[in-house]
Amino acid sequence: MRQSWWLCLCLAFLGAAWACAETEVPRTVVEVSVSGPEQIATLDRLGLSLDWVKNGVARGLITKSGVETLRAAGFDPKVIYWDFREENPEAWLIPGYYHSYAAMGAALDSIQRAYPAIAHLDTLGFSIQNRAIWGLRITLNPTGGKRGKPKYNINGDHHGNELIGGEAALAYAKYLTSNYAGNSLVRRLVDESDVWVVPMVNPDGREANTRGNSRGADINRDYGYEWNNTEGVSEPGPFGEPEIRAMRNLFMKGPYVASMDFHSGTMYTLYVWGFTTMAAMDSAGMRRVGQIYNTYFPVGYGQIARDLYQVWGGSTDYYYGCGGDIISFAAELSNSYAPPASAIDTICARQISALIPMMQETRKGLWGMVRDSITHQALPARLVVANHGWSCYTDPEYGDYHKYLYPSAGTDTVTAYANGYDPKTLQVTVGADTFAQLNFDLRANAASNYTGFTCPIIRSTRTPSVPADLPWTQKCLGIHDGQGLALSHSSVTPYIALDMGPTTPVINRTGNDFTVYLTAAASYTVQATNNMDGTWANCGSGSGTQQSFDLTTAGLDSARYVRITGTVSLDAVEALPRPSGVEESPRVEGQVSVAPSLVLLGPNPAKEGLVIKATLPAGWSRLAVYDITGHLVKMLNQATLPAGSSQIFAWNGVDDSGRKVTSGTYFARLETPQGNRLVRVVLLR
């Protein structure tokens, strides 16, 4: 009786508080009859944040005044709750019923304190209101590096009012750590995996009980792959919200084998694509994992755009499209945003029971290392498995890759690509329900072109055409081959940005630095940057099917990202080889013609340094050592000398700051008015 009296009193106070709260926060739950995608798009433009579309009915959140807006537009919205918290008031009242921001931080900290050998809490970034976005890393020796382990991401609370998602992510972290000592399967998964748990992606929204963050942005529409406006705010481009930049930066440190993004508002397990109903190239594997997950969470599974609604700029499409995360899933856990206490443990237990076999399944297929053939230095590389769809990527620091294959029985042909290296193709036999290791040692080739590595940003609303468009942005990667991705947009100028590689940006040298290839003549503009969150510098405009650009126009010494804006069919972006080979310059009248030469006297490979003999023409010359990415390591000479001068130069294996450099491939490059010369050297310490 006392509990009922207390609850009634709290509800009375809560009702008064809600009445005085900001009425334009989208908390009203409505259902609207729709006849097709056009009406769904209209609802989106009118401010309805969709939860699901089933049997001709769309359900979602809107502001109270937005209900009248829908009616004025000819819709007949049915109000389910004027405030979604009415469905289960206890969830928003009882302290500790759901973890608040502070309680979540305390819970995560308690896990790392209790299990320091396998858990470490990191701050990935901060929200607009300066709340930490926490990531709990669970693996053996969590502060000692990944070292070739497959990486997983389990997250919740992209939408702050969908409380159960964060609880499910936290429950999984508790399960892995508390069962590590006594459960051999859990121990093996933790020892051999790198698991990141991010329970509260949107802490400001969680504290305010709103879908969006503190400025109303639906942050799960802010990822770069097939971005098309971040709902709730006006943004010039993707990654405008700090919460999503934090998630992106974690992902860029190494791609995931699988990820799970927990939501609520309906019950379903979902995978890519969200932006189109076209099936993904790896859809067979996605369906297989969906079947396994559905065994333990039997609510149905399918593609986001087909079985839920169209989503632009979502996390699942980004992780798959940009990084080849084959199992990029989202699970809708409950028809209620915050189910009652009696359901929380059951919901979380189901997710735990489904996540364990998902991790087991996604370890099947291929894994291995991609390294420099001489130094065995880890390489950022892109791998393509014939007839198994999307590219996958190595960890840029450790050089390991992991590719889930389904079906995984048979002989597969695999090609590894790395900028500055010759590609290499190998074959491997992968048994059913197991994995195979396939390592690649690539040969450095300074004369090779540097090409687009991956696509972190694209804005294009063109409906794909099957089967020609199945590879989608994969068409734009690598060298030009006559296959292009056609960009178009219904209301704005489309664009696409290519990442030229984490260690291989375009370098500004004499003359043009990179070339844009199209499959059909068109007009476009080109911008470049080293920071996709910063300013994009203008490199100029182009037309035709092939045109080169100079970073000097943009005022940049280098550029990791190149963006093409226009209604074009993009084939490739290729940077010129670097360091370059011979680049002949016009002869100066009256100057003594002495051809420059560069001879490596030895040793090669070297342990501590090397000796170089240079024959120099008249005038200015420059001799320097560069690393494999084209960055200056050590300036050996920069002076004006008489024609025919021959000098001996020594490099002791240190950079311009006096620090010893690591083992690896380096290039000594002589630049003169009469031409340039290049020799490749290898340092083995």
Image (tube, rainbow, N blue to C red):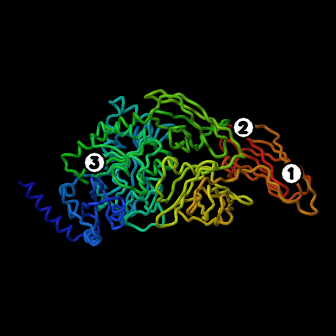
- Mark 1 or 2: in front is 1
145 vs 289, nearest the viewer:
289
Q: Find numbered disc 1 in the image and state the secondary structure of the residue it sits on.
A: loop
C-alpha separation, residue under disc 2 versus residue under disc 3:
61 Å
First reached walking from the N terminus: tag 1 or tag 2: 1
User: Which residue, given by chain and number where applicable, does mark 3 sit on?
Assistant: 267
Residue found 54% across the figure and 38% down from its top: 400
* Residue lying farthest to the left in this orientation: 1
Residue 557 position, x and y percent, is: 66, 60
Quadrant containing the C terminus is top right
Which residue lies under the disc numbered 2?
607
For the N terminus, the image quarter is bottom left
From the top left corner, tell me how far across and down residue 34 is, in percent.
29, 60
**Can residue 256 be seen by looking at this rendering?**
yes
Kindly report the distance in space between the C-alpha atoms of the residues bearing marks 1 and 2.
27 Å
Contact (Cβ within 8 Å) of mark 1 with mark 2: no
* Residue named by callout 1: 596
